[in-house]
């Protein structure tokens, strides 16, 4: 059975995100390594864009994998709306966490 382009894009999206997270990179850091905007990394990870072959290879290189690794069948995790939570490290370094009290 032949797979459609959307399926391949979802495989790439899931693999890019999983590899980025496994390597402890932010979308901004991955974008910088690959020479693309962080917003474009976000679109790739959500399978919202039909990326060029050059970007595909740049992402693979930035993640230190062969391009074929990004084509392995993989499931996209469910989307979690909103911004990521701030790490507790900022609090440990003297940063303040909002309490909601005035």
Image (spheres, rainbow, N blue to C red):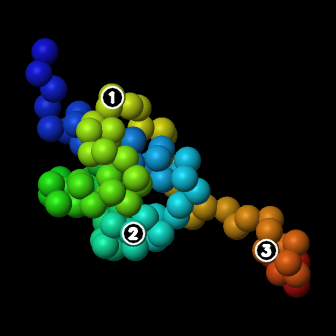
Residue picked out by circle 3: 90
Mark 3, other Cα within 10 Å: few <14 / some 14–19 / many ≥20: few
Mark 1, other Cα within 10 Å: few <14 / some 14–19 / many ≥20: some
Residue picked out by circle 2: 33
Q: Quadrant where the N terminus lies? A: top left
The residue at 33%/28% (across/down) is 73
What is the C-alpha distance between the residues marked 1 and 3? 37 Å
What's the mark number on residue 95? none
Q: Nearer the viewer, residue 54 or 99?
A: 54
Q: Estimate the x, y position of residue 44 in percent, counting from the top left.
A: 31, 55
The residue at 23%/54% (across/down) is 56
Q: Nearer the viewer, residue 66 or 14?
A: 66
What's the mark number on residue 73? 1
Point out the tag, 2 or 1, that comes first from the N-terminus.
Answer: 2
**How many labels were placed on the picture?**
3
Q: Is residue 102 above or below residue 99?
A: below
Quarter holding residue 75: top left
Q: Quadrant where the C terminus lies? A: bottom right
Q: Nearer the viewer, residue 95 or 101?
A: 95
Q: Secondary structure at mark 2?
A: helix
Q: Estimate the x, y position of residue 89 in percent, counting from the top left.
A: 80, 68
Asked whether, in this view, residue 21 is left or right of residue 91, the answer is: left
């Amino acid at each position: 059975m032949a797979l459609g382009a959307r399926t391949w894009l979802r495989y790439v999206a899931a693999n890019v995100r999983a590899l980025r997270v496994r390597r402890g990179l932010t979308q901004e850091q991955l974008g910088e390594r690959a020479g693309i905007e962080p917003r474009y990394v976000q679109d790739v990870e959500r399978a919202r864009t039909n990326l060029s072959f050059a970007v595909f290879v740049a992402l693979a290189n930035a993640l230190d994998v062969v391009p074929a690794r990004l084509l392995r069948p993989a499931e996209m995790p469910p989307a979690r709306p909103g911004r990521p939570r701030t790490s507790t490290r900022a609090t440990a370094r003297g940063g303040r966490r909002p309490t909601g009290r005035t």
